[in-house]
């Protein structure tokens, strides 16, 4: 039996079939103390009806775990959806999974296993769905790697191609731009670089109180960078953010939100349009900083402290929430 219980949260917005597919992929891996929560972020289509009708079959697949549907009532962004799903949290860890992703066998056990003393969060090996080949000049649809190379998905029935990595976490460059680590790398297990941000102890003392008071996933960043911000807060408090190659996710890239904007290419995160940027990177300015990716990640909840918090009484991991939006029967 797995030592840690988990609450798996999926956020839906106007794509109930995709969300149910993601939920069914993880449901068989859940145990008696686990809880699968689907949050509908104010969809104005038939999502709530479709999700409600699918609960019976989903509960059968997840048995003996609990399955709940939460109607957030409004679309306040991904972070707000996550925190709505975390209301009343009693499990040992929170697992975040994109609704356009599916997990492979062993995902949940592998993702949760490293959590413990000093490890505050883990992130999965996220692969692009399908096979990919180098693009030709005639290709009109493609993804662009950081080195400028272009990749096109192999069509159904077409042979060849290779599996590419979507993400092994996120990185932030010295200018504050975020992007997927290992983006469009061929699927060879990445070199052993399990840790995220290096802790900088000289900054811990005066930031720790602020970190403790701003627990959880930020709800004022509508989409993107909420995971980066949380990673910084964890690392500033002395926790590791660890990449876990044994937890594998297949991701239908941007199926729920589109691939890019006119100003931001796929693979790079748009800068958050808000009055506050994510927590400022710490450490050497010339270094890139590695963080988790909410497409497939786990966060420890309470129950232990980092070395930096040995004299304090709480963990800055996801807080237990008490205010819940209405649950759908």
Image: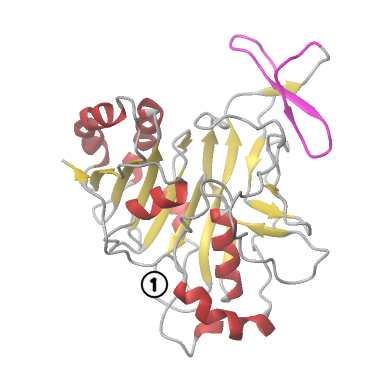
Q: Name the colouring of the figure.
A: secondary structure
Q: Using the rendered view, name the quadrant where residue 216 is placed.
A: bottom left
Q: Residue at x 66, y 81 (%)?
A: 203
Are there few (<14), some (14-19), or many (20+) residues within 10 Å of tag 1?
Answer: some
Q: Using the rendered view, name the quadrant where residue 238 is placed.
A: bottom right
Outermost residue toward the front in this view:
275
Q: Determine if residue 54 is in view.
A: yes
Image x and y of residue 230, in percent: 54, 62
Q: Is residue 189 magenta?
A: no
Q: Residue at x 24, y 28 (%)?
A: 49
Outermost residue toward the left in this view:
329
Q: Give SS at disc 1.
A: loop
Q: Main secondary structure of the magenta part?
A: loop
Give the quadrant of the N terminus.
bottom left
From the viewer's side, name the closer residue of 141 and 306. 141
From the viewer's side, name the closer residue of 173 and 309. 173
Tag 1 residue:
302
Locate residue 159 relative to residue 31 in the image: left or right. Answer: right
Q: Is residue 143 magenta?
A: yes
Locate residue 317 relative to residue 86 in the image: left or right. Answer: right
Image x and y of residue 143, in percent: 71, 28
Q: Which residues are magenta?
A: 138-160
């Amino acid at each position: 039996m797995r030592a840690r219980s988990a609450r798996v949260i999926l956020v839906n917005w106007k794509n109930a079939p995709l969300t149910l597919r993601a939920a069914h992929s993880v449901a068989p891996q859940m145990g008696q103390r686990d809880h699968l929560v689907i949050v509908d972020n104010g969809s104005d289509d038939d999502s709530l009806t479709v999700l409600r009708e699918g609960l019976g079959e989903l509960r059968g697949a997840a048995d003996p775990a609990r399955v709940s549907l939460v109607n957030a009532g409004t679309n306040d962004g991904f972070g707000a959806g996550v925190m709505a799903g975390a209301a009343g949290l009693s499990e040992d860890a929170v697992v975040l999974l994109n609704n356009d992703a599916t997990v492979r066998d062993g995902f949940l056990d592998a993702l949760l296993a490293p959590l413990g003393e000093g490890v505050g969060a883990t992130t999965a090996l996220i692969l692009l769905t399908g096979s990919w080949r180098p693009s030709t000049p005639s290709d009109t649809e493609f993804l662009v790697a950081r080195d400028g190379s272009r990749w096109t998905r192999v069509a159904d029935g077409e042979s060849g191609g290779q599996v590419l990595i979507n993400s092994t976490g996120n990185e932030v460059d010295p200018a504050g731009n975020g992007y997927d680590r290992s983006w469009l790398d061929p699927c060879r297990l990445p070199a052993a670089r399990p840790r995220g941000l290096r802790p900088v102890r000289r900054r811990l003392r005066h930031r720790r109180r602020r970190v403790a008071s701003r627990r959880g996933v930020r709800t004022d960043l509508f989409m993107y960078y909420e995971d980066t911000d949380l990673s910084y807060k964890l690392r500033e408090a002395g926790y590791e953010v660890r990449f876990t190659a044994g937890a594998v996710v297949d991701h239908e890239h941007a199926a729920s939100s589109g691939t890019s904007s006119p100003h931001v290419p796929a693979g790079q995160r748009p800068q958050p349009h808000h009055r506050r940027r994510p927590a400022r990177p710490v450490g050497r300015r010339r270094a890139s900083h590695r963080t988790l990716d909410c497409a497939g990640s786990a966060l420890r909840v309470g129950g232990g402290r980092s070395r930096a918090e040995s004299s304090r009484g709480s963990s800055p991991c996801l807080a237990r929430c008490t205010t819940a939006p209405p649950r759908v029967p």
